[in-house]
Image: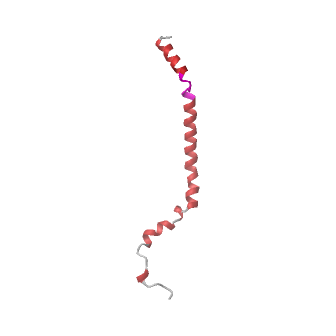
Amino acid sequence: MGQMPQLYRDPWAAREAWRKHPVFSNKFMFRNFMPGFALGAAAFGAYVAVDSLFHPSNIEKLKEEAKKQRGEA
């Protein structure tokens, strides 16, 4: 009674073994989620900073400068 006969052996056990590997645990996934998230947040922050520095939000000011450059004003 110690060992099951070959008749009851799971033929898919080898294909399902990856599910129990520690790399696919929720703890490991969450711990390794943070480095990528921090890098993405830093890159997005840099993009927003550069965008706000080099693209003025005042559209009327841009139109006035364009008219001055064309000599219309």
**Res. 39 image quadrant:** top right
Query: What residue span does the magenta drawing correspond to?
Result: 53-59
Q: How many marks?
A: 0
Q: Residue 49 at x, y = what percent?
A: 58, 34
Q: With respect to residue 38, does 69 lie above or below?
A: above
Give the residue at x 56% y 32%: 50
User: Would you identify the image quadrant in which residue 45 lies?
Assistant: top right
Report the residue at 59% width, 56% height from top: 31
The residue at 56%/61% (across/down) is 26
In the rendered image, residue 54 lying in the magenta stretch gets the answer yes
- In this picture the colour scheme is secondary structure
Image height of 49 relative to 7, above or below: above
Residue 12 placement (x, y as % from top left): 42, 72
Q: Tell which residue pokes out farthest to the front in this image.
A: 60
| Residue 11 sits above or below residue 63 on the image | below
Above or below 39: residue 27: below
**Closer-to-camera residue (50/73):** 73
Task: Determine the image quadrant of residue 22.
Answer: bottom right
**Relative depth, front residue between 60 and 68:** 60
- Image coords of residue 56 (percent x, y): 56, 26
The residue at the point 49 percent across, 15 percent down is: 67
